[in-house]
Image: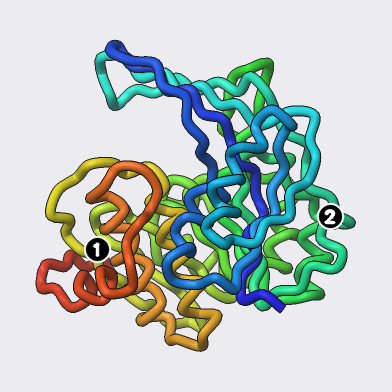
Amino acid sequence: MYDICCIGHITLDKVVTPDSEVYMPGGTAFYFAHSLYNIDHNFLLVTALAKDQIAFVEDLRNKGIHIKLLPSLYTVYFENIYPANQDIRIQRVWQKADAFQKENLDGVDAKIYHLGSLLADDFSLDLIKSLSEKGIVSLDVQGMLREVEGTNVVAVDWKEKIEALQHIDILKANESEMEVLTGTDDIAEGARILANWGVREVVITLGSMGSIIFSENKFFLIPAFVPQKVVDATGCGDTYMAGYLYKRSLGASLQEAGEFGAAMATLNIENSGPFNGKMTDILVKINGNEKIFPVGKY
């Protein structure tokens, strides 16, 4: 029995800027697994890769992370093009990996299953229902709101959300994703709508303004810990959820788990690449003085 099982595709990412063209692994599963490496080894990663990208998991296995590698004709291949204006991103998908199937999780037992969605067809409703009968289901909703038309990534609503969210215990969304799902930009109202649809713990991340967690009709305000420097924000949401679910798997309160995840996310921002901090670094960050709490009426 694992504490946490993360299910998701590791991607091949091509990042193009006016000055460079870089290839690197990425995806929720990649950043989540790295984030848990130094704090919890009772963790399983379920991912799917084409044969020529299997090296992506070798480093993780060498660190002692348990991996169930599924065969796939292709690896998810994202191209992210950043023009001179870095606020603009052109995103394309040149390859998609095989979707995860219910039978892929036969014999996999965990307290918490975290679904790291990248594209809308990664996880079927049947798979979500099946996992909900085995344990706690957590979902990063990001990918459920993205479809591929040709090679272009298109923003969409999640057609099966009303039925599917009845089987999701923990949902993570940023404020934009919450608005797409619920039709409101009011954080408190959106969180309540998601809870009414069946989500037990609603986690809304607000970037540098912290995050809120809504559960049992109560709001928990989670501060953002001010980084010493901003180096790379890639994978921050995945790092946050790794810390949050780790603490929840141990029985920590929502506030404690949220602050732990937020501290890990800040440490991630302060360095390039996936999270590589240790428990002592996280505790120092939590006990620091520079915090920004969410604003608004909750």
The numbered dot on residue 97 is: none
The 10 Å Cα crowd at callout 2, few under 14, some 14 to 19, many 20 or more, is some
Which quadrant of the figure contains the N terminus? bottom right
Between 222 and 18, the residue placed more toward the observer is: 18
Q: Colour scheme used in the picture? A: rainbow
Q: Nearer the viewer, mark 2 or mark 1?
A: 2
**Quadrant in which residue 118 is drawn:** top right
Indicate whether 210 appears above or below 178. below
**Quadrant in which residue 126 is drawn:** bottom right
The numbered dot on residue 224 is: 1
Can residue 298 be spotted in the picture?
A: no
Q: Provide residue 243's location: percent of width, then percent of height.
A: 43, 68
- Looking at the rendered structure, the secondary structure element under dot 1 is strand
Picture residue at 38% right of the left edge, 67% below the top:
261
Q: Provide residue 144's location: percent of width, then percent of height.
A: 63, 45
Which quadrant of the figure contains the C terminus? bottom left
The 10 Å Cα crowd at callout 1, few under 14, some 14 to 19, many 20 or more, is many
Q: Provide residue 141's location: percent of width, then percent of height.
A: 57, 51
Q: Which callout, 2 or 1, points at the residue further toward the start of the chain?
A: 2
Picture residue at 69% right of the left edge, 48% below the top:
47
**Residue kind at label 2, given as amino acid type:** Asn
Picture residue at 67% right of the left edge, 37% below the top:
54
**Residue kind at label 1, given as amino acid type:** Ala
Residue at which label 2 appears: 104
The CA span between labels 2 and 1 is: 37 Å
Between 212 and 132, the residue placed more toward the observer is: 132
Can residue 52 be spotted in the picture?
A: yes
Picture residue at 40% right of the left edge, 48% below the top:
274
